[in-house]
Amino acid sequence: MFWPMTAIALGFLGIAVLGILAIKVFVEAQRLGRQVADTTRKINRAAEDLERAAVHLAGAGETLR
């Protein structure tokens, strides 16, 4: 009777450990998603700034003609 109870206890502990690891992976995946979204916003903002600067530069080049 000892070995079946030990096997059940170890199985439960194994499932508990896997559950804890799954929660950690989920939290890290959410954090990574937030970082990707933040970086995407920064890249889009930089692209818009670059586009505005290019338009301004093109306008300045036209005035030199």
Image (cartoon, rainbow, N blue to C red):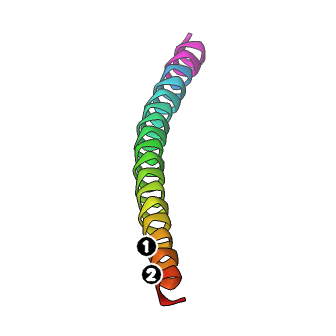
Q: Which residues are magenta?
A: 1-9
Q: Residue 23's mark? A: none
Residue type of the residue flagged with mark 1: His
Residue 4 position by quadrant: top right
2 within the magenta span:
yes
Callout 2 amino acid: Ala
- What residue does disc 1 label? 56
Q: Secondary structure at mark 1?
A: helix
Q: What's the residue at 50%, 65% (across, down)? A: 51
The residue that mark 2 highlights is 60
The answer to the question of whether label 2 and label 1 lie on touching residues, with beta carbons closer than 8 A, is yes
Indicate the position of residue 43 as horizontal and vertical percent values: 47, 60
**Quadrant where the C terminus lies?**
bottom right
Q: Position of residue 15 (x, y in %)?
A: 53, 24
User: Looking at the image, how many numbered discs can be counted on the residues?
Assistant: 2
| Magenta span main SS | helix
Instruction: Looking at the picture, tell me which residue is in the foreground, 18 or 41.
Output: 41
> Residue at 45% of width from left, 59% of height from top?
48
